[in-house]
Amino acid sequence: MLRWIIPIIIYIAIDLYAFQAVRTVTNSTWLYVLYALSSLVVLSLLVYALSSGQARTNPKMMYIFGFFLAVFVPKLLVIIFMFGEDIVRLFMGVFAKINGKEAGFYLPSRRKFISSIALGVAAIPFASLLYGMIQGKYNYKVLKYALEFDDLPQAFDGYTITQISDIHSGSFDNKEKISYGIDLINQQKSDVILFTGDLVNNIAEEMKPWKELFSSLTANDGVYSVLGNHDYGDYVSWNSEIEKNKNLSTLKNLQKEMGWRLLLNENTTLEKNGETIKLIGVENWGAGGFKKAGDLKKACEGVATTDFKILMSHDPSHWQEEVKMNDKNIHLTLSGHTHGMQFGIEIPGWFKWSPVKYRYENWAGIYEEFGRYINVNRGFGYLGYPGRVGIWPEVTVITLKKKPSDA
């Protein structure tokens, strides 16, 4: 019981504190009533979410969470302004008391100017979070990179890879928008399409309504995939281990039926004009408490150090922990998982920031160390918050280039 009573009490306290800014700016009874009604609706949704026991990955619960964020985050910003002003007011009151300017304790009234600024600033995340749920989550972006390698086989000079990741089909709610995203992938006309995990939120059934659409993905050398942490069904309760294993088997079969080749700690060969590169796929391996089913050593069996290699590994922490210094010399790793937290600020080619950077060293885009590269795809879908703000859904196109010899 205390698990959700305490959050409710905290929310009410924050709500009442933020209301002080509204009361300072206006004396409109109608606005007071509107504020109270919106607060009551959000509080009711919070109580429902905390007491229902439904998974956070349930689409209905995600929208409740999204609406809660859209209202709650702006109020947090308001109280930061209000608290700062209250600290100043307190010091002014203490100073006046010390100097004997008032017989009693004097506390200056709130300034309308500060409250107006607070409400104005709070309007930005409110509008942004609502936009993210309505439009941002389907605001697909094609990001293109060209990477040069000394030892790339000549036949693969100009070879193109389209990477997608984190589909999270259990969150989808708009077939027309998803169809547009699929068309955008096919329009890239890449040599190969690589999917780096998290096809579903929890269970294989989530993918079935979207199976036909994703079956239409085509590339000359095919579509390859790996598993992400959400694909194993670890985040739901099963009646038995047999039922859980059956779900995973269904997910694997779905990918086969879609014409995708799922790589499970194994490798395959891509051939072009008599030359080859190795494509390696590991199961999920994540630092911390995430599943560690990935076996890089097994996946690299039969692969020579001199082979040019592309690794598909869902979680970018795997690159830091096991891949980048591996003596197999893995040239390019493709990951996803972070979603860029679906929230942040990006100015292409100049600046990018998201809170997720404090959790993952490699969280979005291309990184290079020791001449080895990783691309962290921002994800095709969404999870938790049913939207995206600043970090848009991504289709990555990477062109492999043979580095010209100095001669």
Image (cartoon, helix red, strand yellow):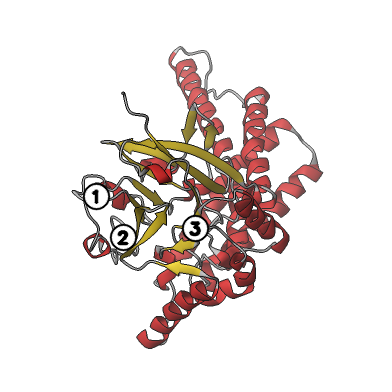
Specify the amino acid type for callout 1: Glu
* Left or right placement of residue 289 versus residue 136 in this view: left
Task: Assess disc 3: are there few (<14), some (14-19) or many (≥20) residues with their C-alpha within 10 Å of its C-alpha.
Answer: many
- Residue 34 is situated, as x and y percent measured from the top left of the image, at 76, 48
- Residue 48 is situated, as x and y percent measured from the top left of the image, at 59, 68
Residue closest to the far front: 274
In terms of depth relative to the viewer, which is nearer, 297 or 340? 297
Identify whether 268 is placed above or below 273.
below
In terms of depth relative to the viewer, which is nearer, 335 or 112? 335
* Disc 3 secondary structure class: loop
Query: Which residue is label 1 attached to?
Result: 321
* Disc 1 secondary structure class: helix
Q: Is residue 203 visible?
A: no
Which residue lies at the image location 39% right of the left edge and 72% below the top edge? Answer: 234
Query: Which residue is label 2 attached to?
Result: 285
* Left or right placement of residue 39 versus residue 374 in this view: right
Query: Which residue is label 3 attached to?
Result: 166
Specify the amino acid type for callout 2: Trp
Task: Assess disc 2: are there few (<14), some (14-19) or many (≥20) residues with their C-alpha within 10 Å of its C-alpha.
Answer: many
